[in-house]
Image (tube, rainbow, N blue to C red):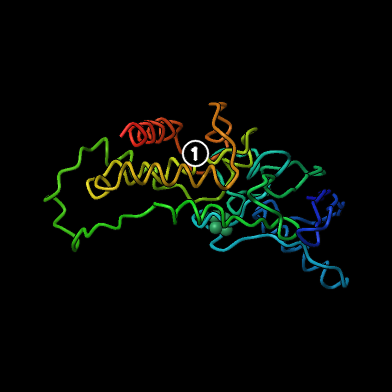
Amino acid sequence: MNLTLKVWRQSGPKDAGRMVTYRVEDVSPDMSFLEMLDVLNERLIVEGDDPIAFDHDCREGICGMCGMVINGVPHGEQRATTTCQLHMRHFEDGAVITIEPWRAAPFPVVKDLVVDRSSFDRIIQAGGFVSVPAGSAPDAHSVPVRKEDADDAFDAATCIGCGACVAACPNGSASLFTAAKITHLSLLPQGQPERLTRAKAMVEQMDAEGFGGCTNTGECTAVCPKGISLDTIAQMNSDYLKANAK
Ligand code: FES
């Protein structure tokens, strides 16, 4: 496959940035998207150019590092797929592909396709944990949990914190991420003692970071590589309202 890439290049946070066009030839359809970028970077290094900076770690769809907007869609148009799990066979030979970083004020660009997502870390630090003594792991059947609650908690816990939800949202809202992190704890017995204080603290931190509000457009869940449900946002809003009513 031969491709034309239009890639966002930005040397640092203060640089204005621009799109730069590259030709990439003899790309195997079996390559992942990141492997295709690796090949381009090896060539840029040989030619004495600055390689394209992009984040990655596991390359298995579990760490959430590999965020980039491909042809206008966070992680590309393949549903429920992270960029590292996206393969070149999903593109046409001769395709023109645009690649940009997440664009949201609370995710400032560090370089090229790399953004600073420490705002997500601070939301977790505000309450995304269980701090009450929960003891050692009990026998599996000693704490009854409804099957539906266990399933919903597990589904919410699959959020990898990649930030695609923010990048897709016209409001730049982090509601889906924050709601997933609140919901996976609030549905389980260990999460109950701090349930309302957790929801209040995390929502307020989300607002303080400058993320926008949720207006139920649903773009977030459409691009989420883990398919996190909008139901988690309803759960978050319910807990947040109860916390304020108290
Ligand atoms: S590199 Fe870890 S999810 Fe893509």
How crowded pointer 1 is (Cα within 10 Å; few <14, some 14-19, many 20+) is rated as: many
Q: Amino acid at mark 1?
A: Leu
Task: Return the residue nearer the eye: 15 or 142.
Answer: 15
Q: Residue at x 86, y 68 (%)?
A: 49
**Secondary element type, mark 1:** helix
Horizontal and vertical percent position of residue 207:
54, 42
Is 217 on the left or on the right of 243, as rendered? Answer: right
Front in this rendered view, residue 113 or 215: 215
Outermost top residue: 216
Residue corresponding to mark 1: 176
Report x, y in % for residue 78: 61, 39
The location of residue 75, given as percent across then percent down, is: 63, 45
Q: Residue furthest left?
A: 142
Which quadrant contains ligand 1?
bottom right
**Which residue appears at 78% of the width and 50% of the height?**
1
Could you say which is closer to the camera, residue 37 or residue 162?
A: 162
State how many labels appear: 1
Task: Name the residue located 58 percent from the left edge and 51 percent from the top edge.
Answer: 85
Q: Dividing the picture into quarters, in which one does residue 97 lie?
A: top right
